[in-house]
Image (spheres, helix red, strand yellow):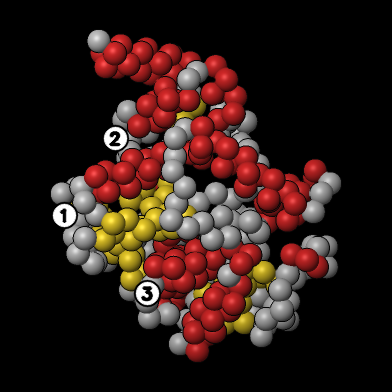
C-alpha cells in the first residue's frame, strides 16, 4: 500500500513505510471535552476511522491511541459558567463525544487515555527538558514552567515558520517568560481556580499545559517513535509544532509522519462554537441519517475544506440512497 504523507523532519511528501513491518502505530489528538461536538470536531475521527479500517483491510495490525483532554482553561471556564465541578463537566461531555462518534460508526480507539491520568509522565518530561536546557521555571514565583523556543533551532519546522515571524498567542500570559513565544509546560495554580484542578510538582502545585499532555501520553503508549500523528489542520501550529519540539528536545524521535485534515466551514468560515456557526452532531443526525452524515464528511479529500449546508447534506443523503438501492438490486 502507498499513500502520501508528510515526513516530520523534511515536510515533504513521501511514500509511507511503517516503523515495524506489518504494524502501524497512530496517535490522534482527541477531544477537549468542554462542550458538545459539532461536525468540525468529528471530521478527524471519521477520517482516521476509515484510515484505520483501510490499513487493517490491507493486512496491518493497527494501534490507534486518541487522548481525551479533560483539564484545560476552557473546561475550567465552562464548568464555572454551568455551576458544576470541572471533573463532572468533563466527564459529562466525554460521554457526549462518545455518543457522537458511535452514531457516526466510529470504532473506539485501541486506547483512549485521559490527560488527568498521566501527570507523572508529564512531570518526567518537564524534568528532562529542564535538565537538557530547553525549559525553565518562571522567575516570578508563579510556579509556571516554560519551553524555551530559542533553545530549539528547529522550532517552526513542521509549519514552515521562523520564530522571529511568529506572533505570540493573543490570550497568552507573558509573565515570567524569556520570550513571548515560549509556551507553558506547567501552569502554576492560581487562587481563583479550584484546588482540585492542580497537582503537586517539583515546581509547586499546578496543572499541565495542553502541548505537554499529548507528548507525554503518546510516549507512554506508543514509545519514543511511532508512525503517524494526526489531527485537524488548526492543530498544526502551535499545538503539533510544540509537541514535536518538546519531544525531540527531550531526545524522542516522536512522529515519523503527520496527517492533518482540513476544516468543516460554514459560509466560508471555520466551524467554531466561538463564531456561533457550529452544527452539533446530535442535532444534524436528527434531520439526516447518521450514515449520510458520515458519507458527507468522507466525500472530499481529507485535506480539502468541507462546506456545511443543508444542500450538501441532502446530496449526501440522496447519494447514500442510490448506493443502498444498487446493493439491494
The residue located at (63%, 44%) in the rendering is 95
Outermost residue, bottom side: 131
> Which residue occupies the foreground of this view, 149 or 214?
214
Q: Are marks 3 and 2 in contact (CB under 8 Å)?
A: no
- Vertical placement of residue 113 versus 263, above or below: below
Q: Is residue 122 visible?
A: yes
**Of the numbered discs in the image, which one, if any, rests on residue 15?**
1
Q: Nearer the viewer, mark 3 or mark 2?
A: 3
The residue located at (44%, 39%) in the rendering is 106
How packed mark 2 is, by other alpha carbons closer than 10 Å (few <14, some 14-19, many 20 or more), is few
The residue located at (63%, 56%) in the rendering is 70
Secondary structure under badge 3? loop
Q: Earlier in the sequence, mark 1 or mark 2?
A: 1
How packed mark 1 is, by other alpha carbons closer than 10 Å (few <14, some 14-19, many 20 or more), is few
The residue located at (58%, 60%) in the rendering is 114
Between the C-alphas of marks 1 and 2, the distance is: 18 Å
Q: Is residue 146 visible?
A: no
- Vertical placement of residue 3 versus 71, above or below: above
**Of the numbered discs in the image, which one, if any, rests on residue 255?**
none
Between the C-alphas of marks 1 and 3, the distance is: 22 Å
Secondary structure under badge 2? loop
The image position of residue 268, as x and y in percent, is 45, 28
Q: Earlier in the sequence, mark 1 or mark 3?
A: 1
**Can you tell which quarter of the image residue 285 is in?**
top right
Q: Would you say 133 lies left or right of 326 here? A: right
Disc 3: which residue: 224
Amino acid at each position: 500500500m502507498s499513500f502520501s504523507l508528510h515526513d516530520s523532519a523534511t515536510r515533504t511528501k513521501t511514500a509511507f513505510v511503517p516503523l515495524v513491518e506489518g504494524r502501524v502505530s497512530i496517535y490522534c489528538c482527541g477531544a477537549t471535552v468542554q462542550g458538545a461536538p459539532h461536525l468540525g470536531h468529528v471530521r478527524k475521527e471519521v477520517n482516521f476511522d476509515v484510515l484505520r479500517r483501510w490499513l487493517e483491510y490491507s493486512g496491518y495490525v493497527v494501534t490507534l491511541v486518541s487522548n481525551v483532554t479533560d483539564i484545560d482553561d476552557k473546561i475550567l471556564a465552562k464548568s464555572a459558567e454551568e455551576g458544576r465541578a470541572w471533573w463532572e463537566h468533563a466527564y459529562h461531555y466525554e460521554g457526549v463525544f462518545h455518543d457522537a462518534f458511535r452514531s457516526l460508526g466510529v470504532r473506539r480507539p485501541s486506547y483512549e487515555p485521559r490527560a488527568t491520568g498521566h501527570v507523572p509522565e508529564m512531570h518526567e518530561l518537564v524534568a528532562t527538558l529542564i535538565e537538557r536546557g530547553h525549559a525553565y521555571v518562571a522567575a516570578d514565583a508563579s510556579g509556571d514552567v516554560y519551553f524555551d523556543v530559542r533553545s530549539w533551532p528547529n522550532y517552526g519546522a513542521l509549519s514552515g515558520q521562523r520564530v522571529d515571524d511568529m506572533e505570540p498567542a493573543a490570550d497568552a500570559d507573558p509573565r515570567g517568560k524569556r520570550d513571548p513565544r515560549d509556551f507553558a509546560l506547567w501552569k502554576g495554580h492560581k487562587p481563583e481556580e479550584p484546588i482540585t484542578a492542580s497537582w503537586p510538582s517539583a515546581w509547586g502545585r499546578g496543572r499541565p499545559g495542553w502541548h505537554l499532555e499529548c507528548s507525554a501520553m503518546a510516549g507512554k503508549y506508543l514509545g519514543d517513535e511511532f508512525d503517524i500523528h494526526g489531527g485537524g489542520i488548526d492543530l498544526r501550529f502551535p499545538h503539533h509544532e510544540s509537541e514535536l519540539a518538546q519531544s525531540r528536545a527531550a531526545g524522542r524521535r516522536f512522529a515519523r509522519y503527520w496527517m492533518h485534515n482540513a476544516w468543516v466551514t460554514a459560509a466560508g468560515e471555520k466551524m467554531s462554537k466561538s463564531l456561533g456557526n457550529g452544527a452539533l452532531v446530535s442535532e444534524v443526525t436528527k434531520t439526516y441519517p447518521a450514515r449520510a452524515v458520515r458519507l458527507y464528511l468522507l466525500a472530499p479529500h481529507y485535506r480539502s475544506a468541507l462546506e456545511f449546508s443543508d444542500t450538501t447534506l441532502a446530496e449526501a443523503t440522496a447519494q447514500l440512497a442510490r448506493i443502498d438501492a444498487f446493493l439491494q438490486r
